[in-house]
């Protein structure tokens, strides 16, 4: 292989890459809007502080592969009777090689270089090309499917009373931060979860704000507290104005009543469908997801060590 150079992308290179990425990921958004959306996401406080774009160039300076790395915080179990650790790690996103450069080992070289320089012990990604490509570096897939629910079929029985209110982002994060930590207590060593952070969550919502603005709609608050049979539950469901469907980003309960609570919010918004991630539950399976986790060191990362992986897919 000719000499290759690994580097951080300049702002101009990033803008140029957005056009390439639009070809792969713009979906229902016009490509120029996708480019604008990326600029908005990089300009968000989380984007400015925590996202870096890396490129691999050949000797002529041509970018032959590229990726983003987000710095996230994770909860990790330290073993039975040991406290839950909170540590920084990475989320790899948007790995892309220009079509005419594919199949020459460039993305692999880029990932080799990134994993060498990154200072953390843990990381995650969502693969769009199945698990095999990333397994070479020890990433392991966690089972997860995308389900879609027709809100009409999951309305709560009239006898069931669900008290619900929208809450602010800080309160939402405060509740689920404690709850996620609690869910990890007693689990064996090495289980990984993305730790809830206000700025990261707001950044996740930023793209939905962008979609709403594009459609001339105001995005309603996506954070909720529900009281079901005397117990408090929290969920985050957001309108995707481009697809016309709602997306659940977090639900801390797998009870069907919880889906009914989400369905009633979605119905109030005048939407007919919502989707969520799970490993097995109700709804129509739309697709198999491919969240993957990674750890440096002697203990190999196992499938299912990455718990609650939904937030690793943000594109
Ligand atoms: C995936 C991608 C980044 C690989 O880039 P590359 O520089 O060609 O990668 P490498 O040459 O290092 O490795 C090629 C390997 O990628 C894997 N791969 C590429 N596309 C794949 C696909 N659609 N499905 C499954 N595996 C795929 C194969 O294992 C392939 O190995 P092979 O050449 O032995 O068949 C490139 O195909 C791409 O940009 N695709 C479009 C964007 C995308 O889907 N990115 C993945 C984000 S998770």
Image: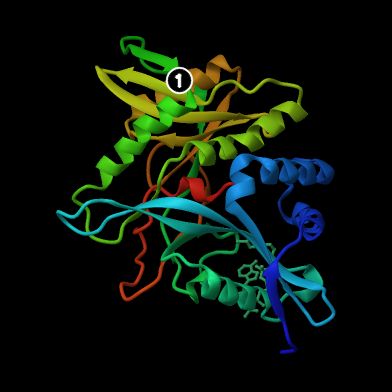
Viewer-nearest residue: 134 or 287: 134
Which quarter of the image is occupied by the N terminus? bottom right
Find numbered disc 1 in the image and state the secondary structure of the residue it sits on: loop
Is residue 293 shown to the viewer in this render? no
Q: In terms of depth relative to the viewer, which is nearer, 314 or 245? A: 314
Q: Quadrant of residue 243?
A: top right
Graded by Cα atoms within 10 Å as few (under 14), some (14 to 19) or many (20 or more), the crowding at tag 1 reads: some
Does residue 46 appear in this view?
yes
Q: Quadrant of ligand 1?
A: bottom right
The structure residue drawn at horizontal position 33% and vertical position 26%, both measured from the top left corner, is 233
Question: Does 256 sit above or below residue 13?
Answer: above
| Residue topped by disc 1 | 167
Against 163, residue 284 (above or below) is: below
Residue 54's place in the image compared with 26, above or below, is below
Q: Is residue 211 left or right of residue 93?
A: right
Q: Residue 96's spot in the image, x, y percent?
A: 69, 64
Q: Residue furthest left?
A: 81
Rendered residue at 34%/35% (across/down) = 254
Residue in the picture at 32% in, 41% down: 180
Percent across and percent down for residue 300 are 34, 72
The answer to whether residue 141 is left or right of residue 26 is: left
User: Is residue 48 found left or right of 234 in the rendered image?
Assistant: right
């Amino acid at each position: 292989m000719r000499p290759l150079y690994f580097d951080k992308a300049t702002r101009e290179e990033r803008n140029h890459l957005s056009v390439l990425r639009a070809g792969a990921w713009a979906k229902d958004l016009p490509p120029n809007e996708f480019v604008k959306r990326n600029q908005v996401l990089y300009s968000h406080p989380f984007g400015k502080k925590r996202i870096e774009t890396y490129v691999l160039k050949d000797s002529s300076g041509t970018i032959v592969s590229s990726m983003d790395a987000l710095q996230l915080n994770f909860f990790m179990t330290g073993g039975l009777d040991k406290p839950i650790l909170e540590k920084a790690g990475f989320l790899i996103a948007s790995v892309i090689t220009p079509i005419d450069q594919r199949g020459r080992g460039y993305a692999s070289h880029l990932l080799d270089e990134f994993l060498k320089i990154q200072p953390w012990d843990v990381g995650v990604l969502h693969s769009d090309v199945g698990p095999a490509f990333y397994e070479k570096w020890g990433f392991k897939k966690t089972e997860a499917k995308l389900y879609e629910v027709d809100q009409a079929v999951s309305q709560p029985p009239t006898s069931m009373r669900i008290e619900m209110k929208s809450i602010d982002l800080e309160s939402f994060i405060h509740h689920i931060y404690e709850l996620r930590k609690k869910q990890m207590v007693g689990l064996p060593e090495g289980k990984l979860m993305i730790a809830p952070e206000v700025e990261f969550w707001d950044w996740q919502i930023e793209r939905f704000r962008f979609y709403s603005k594009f459609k001339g709609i105001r995005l309603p608050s996506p954070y909720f507290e529900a009281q079901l049979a005397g117990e408090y539950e929290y969920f985050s469901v957001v309108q995707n104005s481009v697809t016309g469907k709602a997306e659940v980003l977090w639900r801390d309960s797998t009870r069907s009543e919880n889906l009914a609570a989400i369905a009633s919010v979605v119905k109030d918004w005048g939407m007919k469908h919502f989707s969520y991630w799970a490993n097995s539950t109700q709804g129509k399976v739309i697709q198999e997801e491919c969240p993957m986790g990674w750890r440096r060191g002697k203990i190999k990362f196992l499938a299912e060590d990455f718990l609650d992986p939904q937030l690793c897919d943000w594109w």
